[in-house]
Image: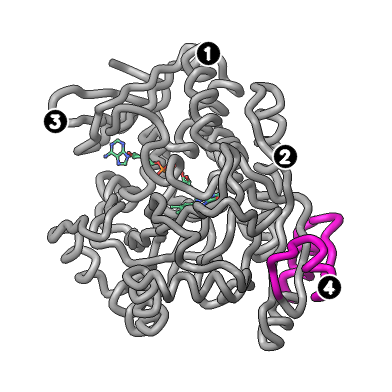
Amino acid sequence: MTYDYIVIGAGIVGLSTAFKILEKSPHVKIVVLEKEDGAARHQTGNNSGVIHSGIYYTPGSLKALNCRKGYRLLLDYCDKKEIKYDLCGKVIVATNIGEVQRLEGLYERGIQNGLEGMKLLSPAEIQEREPGCSGVKGIFVPQTGIIDYKQVCKALEKDIITAGGEIIYNYKVSAISEKPDNIFVTDGSREYLGKKLITCAGLYSDKIAEMTEGKVDVRIIPFRGEYYKIQSTKSFVNHLVYPVPDPAFPFLGVHFTRMIGGGIEAGPNAVLAFKREGYKKTDISLPELLDIFGWKGFRSVMAKYWKTGLGEFYRSYRKKAFVKALQKLVPAISGVDLVPGGAGVRAQACHANGKLVDDFYIIERRNIMHVCNAPSPAATASLAIGEYLAEKVISK
Ligand SMILES: Cc1cc2nc3c(=O)[nH]c(=O)nc-3n(C[C@H](O)[C@H](O)[C@H](O)COP(=O)(O)OP(=O)(O)OC[C@H]3O[C@@H](n4cnc5c(N)ncnc54)[C@H](O)[C@@H]3O)c2cc1C
């Protein structure tokens, strides 16, 4: 089984990469290897379904550049494939005077990142757009939308296969070895041989990278994001409603999201998961936990963020605390309006010095590229990341 390109991981980044390689080099032989029995089983299939505008990211960063470019590529692709999306816009709300400066900073950042049509909102204008919402100042971001990324993956799968690519499910890569011109990938029983390798393994991206690089300078820390569904018939929000994020933490804070399939979700929080694919509070993997706690970078993260981390745990176990965070945005919501929803686990890379990796992070060497950090907004940005990886790997 010999291929020009092997891609590991059938999340939205791996599929977009395979799709873009085939778009640019239609006659190559390519295979995507995925350990689950279908695509988008992890981060991609359990995310908030938001098409991010690009307002948050440091200008010039890979996140900022790929979010804006990926946004346009995604909408074009969805138009072509008739995948439903809704650019319903979002409101970011400062709930106290202390947050106003950071909110205004976000507005400036949005301008630097090329967003047009944003509007600063007075308290009355917030209420006009979101009658249930209270705040001292807000930003309306018209570009933000909602979508089901599983549908995008379905279309990508189909396109890859139509273009002659292969996707092999139930294939868990357990080792990778190299000879001068070839890379051998195995699950312990079947072997695939490729000339070039791109790995997009999400929650296991560091482990897969270590298979060819020995030790790598990042480790994935899994942060579970838990959601509640709003069960009430009351419509609490018209758009998406977000708080001003804590700049020290790479997550956006619990927010309200209208879903493309109907209904509203509240969340996600960001709780340390005791297993990389730990979707439930009771999911624990001792070897994975020891591995994370053994990483000196994680211990530094704990030293820095222990207070925030404990707060997230408290909010995870105490619905009242979760509701309290939501009430800052929408005072009328109460516990009876919320029922537990699903959860997703974020793959957040962390450096050995305890810095959470903020930007997308790719390790490349010769004919190998490892995507080692592709957190939000990587679903929005996926086609741009795929294009970037495809161009790089084709030119190698
Ligand atoms: C709770 C949550 C909310 C989010 N909300 C948004 C949002 O609204 N908008 C947005 O743009 N982004 C959002 N994100 C981020 C976005 O979902 C991710 O950045 C994106 O899905 C990453 O895609 P991926 O393909 O890199 O990873 P994944 O989707 O996790 O895919 C990685 C794949 O690799 C496979 N794999 C791992 N190890 C192996 C192995 N050994 N052998 C074979 N296969 C392997 C896995 O099974 C998996 O299918 C959110 C993420 C989370 C968790």
Near mark 1 (Cα within 10 A), the count class, few <14, some 14-19 or many ≥20, is: some
* Residue at disc 3, secondary structure: loop
Of the image marks 4 and 3, the number of the one nearer the N terminus: 4
C-alpha gap between disc 3 and disc 1: 29 Å
- Which residue occupies 52% across, 59% down? 266
Q: Is residue 195 left or right of residue 12?
A: left
Quick check: can you spot residue 388?
Answer: no
Q: CA distance from mark 1 to mark 2?
A: 23 Å
Q: CA distance from mark 2 to mark 4?
A: 32 Å
Q: Quadrant of residue 101?
A: bottom right
Closest to the observer, 390 or 339:
339
- CA gap, disc 4 to disc 3? 63 Å
Q: Find residue 36 and report its horizontal and vertical position in percent.
A: 29, 32
Q: Which residue sits at x=25%, y=31%?
A: 185
Q: How many C-alpha atoms fall within 10 Å of the one at disc 2: few (<14), some, or many (≥20)?
A: some
SS for callout 2: helix
Taking depth in this image into account, of 110 and 322 the one nearest to the observer is: 322
First of labels 2, 4 by sequence position: 2
| Residue range corresponding to the magenta coloring | 105-134
Q: Earlier in the sequence, mark 3 or mark 1?
A: 1
Location of mark 1 (residue): 163
On the image, numbered disc 4 is attached to which residue? Answer: 124
- Horizontal side of residue 21 vs 75, given as left or right: left
Residue underneath mark 2:
72
Query: Who's the residue at 47% across and 15% down the image?
Result: 161
**Which mark, residue 188?**
3
- The answer to whether mark 1 and mark 2 are in CB contact below 8 A is no
| Ligand 1 is within 8 Å of the C-beta of the residue at disc 4 | no
The answer to whether residue 94 is seen in the rendering is yes
